[in-house]
Amino acid sequence: MSEANEPTGTVEPGDGGAAEPDAPAGTPDAADAGPGRRVRVVLVDDHRMFRTGVQAEIGQTERTGVEVVGEAADVDQAVSVITATRPEVVLLDVHLPGGGGVEVLRRCAALMADAEQPVRFLALSVSDAAEDVIGVIRGGARGYVTKTITGTDLVDSVFRVQDGDAVFSPRLAGFVLDAFASTDAPPIDEDLDRLTQREREVLRLIARGYAYKEIAKQLFISVKTVESHVSAVLRKLQLSNRHELTRWATARRLV
């Protein structure tokens, strides 16, 4: 069964027992986050094993202060679980079935803007591609860290995001500043901005040589919907066929 169809909902935190006197080296400690502090977190990633690993690493609530209250494997699940649990922080993967992390951010915009109980997002991804980083930051995420981060640093990042800070992996921080502040930053691609997030996903897969049926399976949509998206992309970019589309995407390093 595809992970996108797996049951989701509230996840019980760790056993809640007292911490052992000698914790393993490198284990995140709640003391680092401040006495008695707690943060409720939802994990959004389409790889079950990765979610399980993060849960085991940071979800020992009595030790880390992090309570994992829900998990999701695709966009629809993420929006449903986040809306139901209203966590303080969401750890969000960038590449997800159903539209990606940017689509989750778009559909949760009202929750992020809630003055009384804002839901804040921290991207946690294997990707350090410029387009991915800028995309989720523009979408409203408070930070972006890669999956090479240690458990201790991830706990610290979660609490900092809860406090409203912006958090980035060291190499990405300078990149983000350059992208948003430098007068030498690359101009916005107006052609690419005409496309919706889903159209961009279909564009990339077409450019990578995927057949319509493969794209439909990858994005959990029908072949007819894929065809509609391809037609829309060709029309908006004023291209004639998928070969021209592939050259267009390759020239912009989107493949």
Image (tube, rainbow, N blue to C red):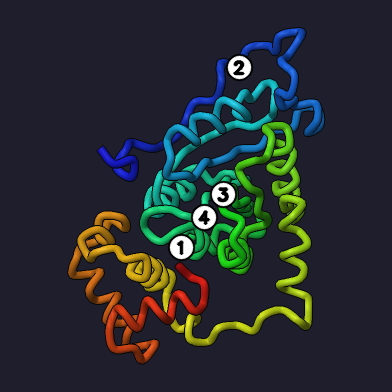
Residue holding disc 4? 94
| Discs 3/1, front | 3
Is there a contact, CB below 8 Å, between mark 4 and mark 3?
yes
Residue holding disc 1? 103
Q: Secondary structure at mark 2?
A: loop
Placement of 66 over or under 207, stated as above or below: above
Mark 3 and mark 1 lie on one chain; the one further toward the N terminus is: 1
Mark 2 and mark 1 lie on one chain; the one further toward the N terminus is: 2
Residue holding disc 3? 125
Amino acid carrying mark 4 in the image: Val
Mark 2 and mark 3 lie on one chain; the one further toward the N terminus is: 2
Is there a contact, CB below 8 Å, between mark 2 and mark 1?
no
Is there a contact, CB below 8 Å, between mark 1 and mark 4?
no
Q: CA distance from mark 3 to mark 1?
A: 15 Å
Q: Is residue 124 visible?
A: yes
Spot the residue most to the top.
21
Q: CA distance from mark 1 to mark 4?
A: 10 Å
| Discs 1/4, front | 4
User: Residue 145 — which label?
Assistant: none
Q: Secondary structure at mark 3?
A: strand
Q: State which quarter of the image contains the N terminus.
A: top left
Residue holding disc 2? 16
Mark 1 and mark 4 lie on one chain; the one further toward the N terminus is: 4
x, y percent for residue 67: 60, 31
Neighbor class of circle 4 (other Cα within 10 Å; few <14, some 14-19, many 20+) is many
Amino acid carrying mark 3 in the image: Ser
Q: Residue at x 25, y 55 (%)?
A: 217
